[in-house]
Image (cartoon, rainbow, N blue to C red):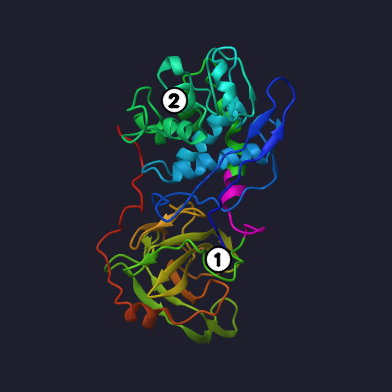
Amino acid sequence: MRKLLLLLAVLVLLPGPVLVAVGAVVVTSATSRAVCGPIVAGVPDALTATTADGVSVHLDRVQLSHAATIIDVGARIDGVGRDGILVALMAALTESRLRMLANTGAYPSSARFPHDGNASDHDSLGLFQMRPAAGWGSVAELMDPQYQAKAFFGGPDGPNNRSPRGLLDVPGWRDLPKGTAAQAVEVSAFPDRYAAYEPVARAILTAITRPGADASAPTRDEPAATAPTSEQVVFPLPHGAGRRLSGFGYRFHPIHQTTRLHEGTDYAAPPGTPVLAVADGIVSFAGPYPGAGNMIVIDHHVDGQDIATAYFHLLDSSFLVADGDQVRAGQQIAGVGSTGDSTGPHLHLEVHPGGFTKPAIDPEPWLAGQAAEPLSEARPAACPVGGPS
């Protein structure tokens, strides 16, 4: 079961004159802003990953706790999403190796704040090596990991009022290579450093936000505890886009040539036709799955009941969501395809009360009972994407 965790401060003994390092604290509560991106599920004790140029990087729990703070802050800011979080992780890995760094040479007072070490790069401080003299904030503010993450992301609600500019203030940042986007915020004298850390950032995001020990398949026995309550259920294809092919029940399988239970309903549609989330929810799986081809599973809470919906045979490279993303009813999540055990382009929809590993029920009466409405077009994501241009 996915849970948002309170990451307790971790005390670590470091060599040198600065002795105390305090890990990040991620606090989520019922009054927090809605999570619109990857959800922190837990922080491992350690992680080792390799940069794009073959350098092995070992990260401890303190560093990964700071990564969790960046993820959690980014997930609560409209327009950041998974891509923006990756850019931020790449920047923090490059600038500080995800350590909260004081700078006693420039600011002796910085040693009074929780930190993981001492640095001496001009007057830079913290995870992103931000400079008070450049207008990023005061020493006290920049020694706060959450403040630094908010400043890096920027945007209309950022603490710096877009000067210096954060990621959301960079025109067209989503169209830039992620290393270039990081440099646009950091304005480093070494602009090519950031791209090397993209594989490490991706490994961190996978380790911290994916549920369970085996992220290659949906194995949980119940939906995510954070699945939002949905007040609306919609049809999984736009109005007039699908034609019913085959319903729920036992049938002769056209590929396996045996009689078996068909656990969903098939709707024929042209390749690339938008596939829509039937209700508000949390993506618990997005990837290849035996027989289903490319599959997405979404956990919901509908009419007082936990429900998982599964969408099979999706078009290659059509995924618009990833594990841990929050979606809203009617949002496009992928496109119709013919991957896996399929004889032609169609959507196979399954409904599983209690979670994906529980028995499926007939989707058609369930949709009808929820008064599912066909939409004329896909809705935007739960949180707007893309920064100002």
Residue type beneath disc 1: Gly
Looking at the picture, does residue 303 appear above or below residue 114? below
**Image depth: mark 2 or mark 1 in front:** 2
Q: What residue type is labelled 2?
A: Val
Element carrying mark 1: loop
Give the side of residue 353 with respect to residue 164, left or right.
right
Q: Please state, as top left, top right, bottom left or bottom right, where the N terminus lies in the image.
A: bottom right
- Residue 325: in sight, yes or no? yes
Query: Residue beneath label 2, please?
Result: 185
Percent position (x, y) of residue 116?
64, 29
Q: Name the residue under label 1.
A: 340
In reply to whether residue 357 is colored magenta, the answer given is: no
- Relative placement, left or right, of 211 versus 225 is right
Q: In which quarter of the image is the C terminus?
A: top left
Q: Which of 342 and 262 is in front in this view?
A: 262
Magenta-tinted stretch? 205-216
How many circles with numbers are drawn on the protein?
2
List x then y, in percent, for residue 78.
36, 44
Residue 13 in the image, given as x and y percentages of width and height = 73, 31
Mark 2 and mark 1 lie on one chain; the one further toward the N terminus is 2
2 to the left or right of 161: right
| Residue 131's disc number | none
At 49% from the left and 86% from the top, the residue drawn is: 249
Spot the residue most to the left.
376
Rendered position, 47 above or below 117 = below
Marks 2/1: CA–CA distance: 42 Å
**Residue 198 in the image, given as x and y percentages of width and height:** 57, 35
Looking at this view, name the residue that lies furthest to the right: 15
Q: Residues within 10 Å of mark 2 (few under 14, many from 20)?
A: many
In the rendered image, which quarter is residue 113 located in?
top right
Q: Is residue 156 above or below residue 26?
A: above
